[in-house]
Image: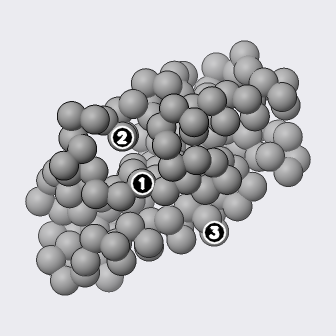
Amino acid sequence: MGASITSLGRKKSLSSLLQYVANPSKKEKCVAVSGINCSEELQKTLQQMNRTRTKLNHSKDITQAYHLVHSFDRDTSKKLNKEVMHAIAVEFAEKSFPNCQVFVASHNDKKHFHSHIVINNIDMETAKRIRID
């Protein structure tokens, strides 16, 4: 299957990152959102992630989140439906970051289907920062 994961690196502003991936101006192109260990609603997710970071003494960390993009190639995007492609991105996020708060927003605003994956940088079980290099 033609899929890839791209890391867009560490992000200093969780708020602007979440706003970007769930951009209301792209609403017709943002076909699905899911929250893993957090809400599917943008403002609630932001509050929950910030609360977790504060509670676990990481509110002043320079890195607040990581941004990954899970993309399907054009041929696969034509073969699979949106629900299946979103489910694959969610499953990837659940297995890769089981103890983290993760927000997945899937888009079809390009010629290929892709999902933005925003990961709060705190492992809720260990209270330690995660690192994605």
Circle 2: element type: loop
Residue 11 can be seen in this image: no
Residue beneath label 3, please? 95
- Which scheme is used to colour this image of the protein? one colour
The mark that comes first in sequence, 1 or 3, is 1
Q: Report the residue marked by disc 1.
A: 33
Residue flagged by tag 1: what amino acid is it? Val
Q: Is residue 11 left or right of residue 94?
A: left
- Density class for disc 3 (Cα within 10 Å; few <14, some 14-19, many ≥20) is few
- How far separated are the C-alphas under marks 2 and 1? 8 Å
| For marks 2 and 1 on the same chain, the one whose residue lies earlier in the sequence | 2
Mark 2 = which residue? Answer: 22
In the drawing, does residue 55 fall left or right of residue 104?
right
At which x and y percent is residue 49?
Answer: 65, 35
Quarter placement of the N terminus:
bottom left
Dot 1 alpha-carbon crowd within 10 angstroms: few under 14, some 14 to 19, many 20 or more = many
x and y percentages locating residue 112 in the rendered image: 18, 62
Q: Residue at x 57, y 36 (%)?
A: 44
On the question of residue 22 being in view, the answer is yes
